[in-house]
Image: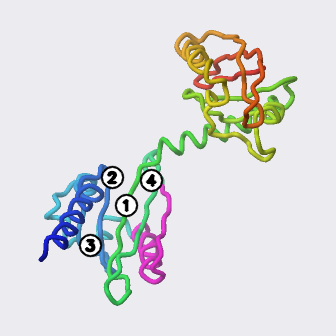
Amino acid sequence: MNSQAKLIADQRDLTYQIIFQNSCEPKFIIDREGIILDANNAFCERIGKRIIDCIGMNVYSILSPDNAAERKKYAETVFQSGKRVYYEEEKNGHYFRVSIYPGFVNNGTVAMIYIFVQDITEAKKAESKNKTHAAFSKEAMEAFPGAFTVLDSTGKIVSSNSYFRDIIAKDKDDDLSGINTFDIFHPDEQAFAYKKLENILLNGVEETADLRIRLHGGPEYRWFRITMVQNNDETHYRR
């Protein structure tokens, strides 16, 4: 093996260790019959076995018949199509995204599949919470006689009324969700605005300040009097 080939092989080994073996999320590789060809520590710990005991074991043997049949369908889809498949499942109050990737051999057929399991419980909670906030506050925000927006604890916009969007958005179809609200303040006042938000989150007080806000994506700024109040772990601010 020449030096270039060895370098590439070493890099592949390092990538394998970082992405697969050292991952804190369960990952394993199976053949078409469900035989485990490789597995990382997180997977083995999840099922209470050593790596040496996992290799060669049929993964479907640790599942109930119904669960095994359902997962075989997902696996077979990947073997037949050669395309990635993912699904979500819930277990004991936790939500998981299972991603299945094809492992090709030289003739282009799928000889094995890579299965990665990701805990998405916190993301699901945040998604549910944001949907609840949007459904609960939409009518109230639209009825408010001025600009109104809801921020999360990091300052990102969760939702806003049309009056606010008319002032801020460059594109009328932009709902502004996910934008950091500090980015719309004048650079000279961003640190001051952050301290106001921090005080609200720490002490639960109401804050009012005169701040310059960028109009329609810039470059023009205009002064507004902003009032910010906390609602649980949200912050509302209004003009």
| Horizontal side of residue 209 vs 57, given as left or right | right
Whether label 2 touches label 1, CB < 8 Å? yes
* Residue pictured at 61% horizontal, 33% vertical: 180
Residue 96: image tag: 4
* Residue pictured at 55% horizontal, 28% vertical: 154
**Rendered location of residue 18, percent (x, y):** 26, 55
User: Which residue, given by chain and number where applicable, does mark 2 sit on?
Assistant: 25
**Farthest bottom residue in view:** 107
User: Which residue, given by chain and number where applicable, does mark 3 sit on?
Assistant: 58
**Rendered location of residue 239, percent (x, y):** 78, 20
How was this image coloured?
Answer: rainbow
Amino acid type at circle 4 is Phe
Q: What element carries label 4?
A: strand
Amino acid type at circle 2 is Glu
Residue 116: image tag: 1
Amino acid type at circle 1 is Phe
Q: Quadrant of residue 227?
A: top right
Q: Quadrant of residue 3?
A: bottom left
Q: How far apart are marks 3 and 4 (CA)?
A: 21 Å
Is 205 situated above or below 46? Answer: above
Amino acid type at circle 3 is Asn
- In front: label 4 or label 1: 1
Which sits in the foreground, 134 or 59?
A: 134
Which sits in the foreground, 36 or 211?
A: 211
- Magenta extent: 66-89
Q: How far apart are marks 4 and 1 (CA)?
A: 10 Å
Q: Distance between the residues labelled 1 and 3?
A: 17 Å
Disc 2 or 3, which lies upstream in sequence? 2
Number of other residues with Cα within 10 Å of mark 2, as a class: few under 14, some 14 to 19, many 20 or more: some
Q: How many marks?
A: 4
